[in-house]
Image: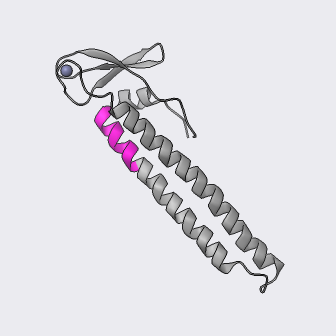
Amino acid sequence: MKSESASERIRVLGFRRWYERQLIEGHLWLASCFVAMIAVAAGMELLTLEGGVREFLTDALLIAGGCVAGWLSWRRYAWTMLRAEAIGEQAVCGGCRHYGFRCCGVDGGRMRARCPKCSHEWLIDEPVPGPR
Ligand SMILES: [Zn+2]
């Protein structure tokens, strides 16, 4: 999957649609974290040596895989929500208090935002990139 910066995605989608997708994506990561926790719990429930070493290793692998998937999903959820919140907090126009903006480029690593109502321009900082 090609990785794009938030400014590129906002330029294509517009801020409000990008923000909405970030919330959906974040909650899908949270749901996958929950599924991974269920896999860990199921693995713990099934873990026993009574069925032989092969079954034990399968259950242990389910637990380990669930832990890794859960941790990665949680990190991705946290990063997605943090980024959406950080950019969302800066989305209010200083000129007319309108919420939302159009991305009109990148200036020194900061996103250049323009108000669709009054054409006021300001710079938006993206948080430091997190896990992918
Ligand atoms: Zn404005």
- Would residue 55 be seen by someone viewing this image from the given angle? yes
Q: For the magenta stretch, what is the residue range?
A: 13-24
Horizontal and vertical percent position of residue 39: 59, 69
Is residue 132 one of those drawn in magenta?
Answer: no
Horizontal and vertical percent position of residue 91: 30, 28
Name the residue at 77% across, 85% down.
51
Q: Quadrant of residue 56?
A: bottom right
Name the residue at 59% across, 50% down.
72
Residue 121 in the image: above or below residue 125 = above
- Left or right of 77? Residue 15 is left
Q: In terms of secondary structure, what is the magenta stretch mainly?
A: helix
Q: Quadrant of residue 47?
A: bottom right
Q: Quadrant of residue 48?
A: bottom right
In the rendered image, the quadrant that contains the C terminus is top right
Residue 19 in the image: above or below residue 30 = above
Name the residue at 83% across, 78% down.
53
Residue 104 versus residue 128: which sits nearer the camera? 128
